[in-house]
Amino acid sequence: MTDAVISLTAITASKNVQEKLSRLGINNELDLMLHLPIRYEDETHLFPINDAPQGQVVQVEGEIVHNEVVMRPRRQLVCQVEDSSGILVMRFLNFYGSQIKAYAVGKRVRLLGEIRSGFFGVEMVHPKCRIVHKDEPLESAMTPVYPTTAGLTQKTLGKLIEQVLSHAQNAQNFAETLPEKIITQYQLAGFKDSVSYLHHPPPDASVDALQARTHPAWHRVKFDELLAQQLSMRLHYRQRRSRIAPALTKKSKKSALSKALLKQFAFKLTAAQKKVSAEISRDLTMPHPMQRLLQGDVGSGKTIVAALAALQAIENGYQVAMMAPTEILAEQHFQKLFAWFEPLDITVVWLSGSQKKKQRQAALAEIESGGAMLAVGTHALFQEQVLFHQLGLAIIDEQHRFGVHQRLALRMKGMLSDTVPHQLMMSATPIPRTLSMSYFADLDVSVIDELPPGRAPVVTKLIADNRRDEIIMRIQQACHQGRQVYWVCPLIEESETLQLQTAMETYDNLSQTFPDLKVGLVHGRLPTQEKSAMMTQFKQGEIQLLIATTVIEVGVDVPNASLMVIENAERMGLSQLHQLRGRVGRGSDASVCILMYQKPLSEIARKRLKIIYEHSDGFEIARQDLHIRGPGEFLGARQSGVPMLRFADLEQDGELLHAAQTAADDMLQHFPELAQRHIQRWLGEKTEYLRV
């Protein structure tokens, strides 16, 4: 397909236009051809002004009978347009002086926009407006509207796309990349016909089917996009499995270390923990690198599963690195794993960017010599000066918070000649199934789908901030009963625009409100040692009420904390609220999470609070969150390398995704050349993003 990918220079000589196209991700003729409309304008017929329906985009035509610039309530251009049925007001809030002259009395205009009742009567605000002659013919088909950027008009973009489409008729751009078998099996429209239809829908096309993207032409385009993603991820998955990794077999004394670790606990592993541990253990025995994502809701016991995986590597003489995105979380892991592994005579070291030079040098020396079998830390673990003696397993917690290159850098630490370490990624943000199938198809996924027994469910309450006195009383009661409380604030500095209570102010106010309680404060800008000391005091029960920002979102485990107040909960995302709520309910006592909100609530905030109030299952919350926000925030830093879907919608197109998965395996097995051509068409150079 080399002759198919023609550069932008061949399409337009203008460097300025090329730069703007590049901003839209258009770098060649093929990109232009697949730059499909976001919507369509129906300029194929006119409505009489008095018969035009309100609340939808319509086209009317008439003569301008009045034109003036009014100054109230703000400067605006107001014109009256009249046809034989009535008068409509055309209003521009932002306008040029040339428009005042252009829309002079007596001019005939054709307007496209939404009609609604306004201050001046029935009106259109900022309609698409063309000066026309009487009896000028209407458009013969719907007008496509393309995604564009500043300085690149629809007219210029449409002309370039038209040029490419006429050239593409005789080029390879329209060639089929799907075998006839797949087209027939999934009842797909032809590629050429689909793309042509979407750029040039005929006069009788269904506007609703095109706008809703349910038309067979959209069906084909979305299938192709999902298929390219699946093909690429499966190929890279196979590629990774062809690499060599240390086979970390189970030793005959079976895991005397694992047995010794489990003996330390007063509880048994859940069935789900045993199942995922077996999956991970089996992967570690293979001579190719494990690339597994361990998912589990808040408090499901992922750390124990990770510890058992670490012991399997250590028993084989290999080191383990465990990386977490924040110092609080990394230090929590270090303290927990140190307490578990020290009785097993395993050296665990801590590495962070804020360590004193002497401590850091000692930790680096232990890692390089192989004396330390487990290194726990933040992104400091993949810095240049960190040299592992023999790294066999990299564990990455809250993996979505790390970029592709950061994860790769940690894994490169274990490169010994041709071998690479195994990689276990963990996430307490449950990933909806369709998202997992699409953006995590290159990983094996294990799910801990049950919580340990004895955990009391957390009761969630929604309380408006004008009932703050009731909340103060609840805190007093909880602390006097020997319990501990979190109070979470979103900001640490005053912000007039957001008008949020700050952690600093809240700390001062609550310290005065509760003179008999020990109140602590922790936020992201505290020096690491102070932060660590504060968390230790809270964990040991010396602090009863902890004022905190969202730095405590993950990893903090204080079983005696049974009440949490989240201030301005309406400002936070569902995933964050669910993570925060998971900091309580970690003991056997009944726990409560109070979501305090400010009125009035926006529609989205109302939806979010309703979801978190009604659901405690992280996977259901994640599914509904995906519906509200789309996939971007679930992917986190991962999306620095992953091309987002442009046309397919995971919520609506779940069945298409299933079909694309099956078709991808079929094509890789029976039609490998077509598979490569299909990937090249849809992803081009982006296929490199999955190297990690």
Image: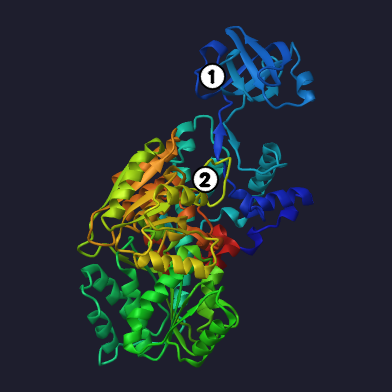
Q: Against 490, is 382 above or below? A: below
Observer-side mark, 2 or 1, equals 1
Residue pointed to by mark 1: 116
| Residue 189 in view in this figure | no
Tell me residue 410's x, y (percent): 52, 77
Please say if the residues under marks 2 and 1 sit with CB atoms less than 8 Å apart: no
Q: How many residues crowd mark 1 within 10 Å: few (<14), some (14–19), many (20+)? A: some
Element marked by disc 2: helix
Tell me residue 85's x, y (percent): 57, 7
Residue at horizontal 76 percent and vertical 26 percent from the top: 96
Element marked by disc 1: strand
Tell me residue 50's x, y (percent): 54, 11
Q: Earlier in the sequence, mark 2 or mark 1?
A: 1
Q: In the picture provided, is 478 more to the left or to the right than 93? A: left
Tell me residue 314's x, y (percent): 37, 87
Q: Against 355, is 391 above or below? A: below
Q: Callout 2, which amino acid?
A: Asp
| Residue 462 in view in this figure | yes
Q: Quadrant of residue 429?
A: bottom left
Q: Quadrant of residue 471?
A: top left
Q: Which mark is residue 41?
A: none
Q: CA distance from mark 2 to mark 1?
A: 38 Å
Residue at horizontal 50 percent and vertical 87 percent from the top: 367
Q: Nearer the viewer, residue 504 or 624?
A: 504
Q: In the picture provided, is 51 more to the left or to the right than 307? A: right
Q: Against 560, is 501 above or below? A: above
Residue pointed to by mark 2: 193
Q: In the picture provided, is 440 more to the left or to the right than 16? A: left
Q: Against 461, is 268 above or below? A: below
Q: Nearer the viewer, residue 186 or 567?
A: 567
Q: How many marks?
A: 2
Residue at horizontal 20 percent and vertical 64 percent from the top: 453
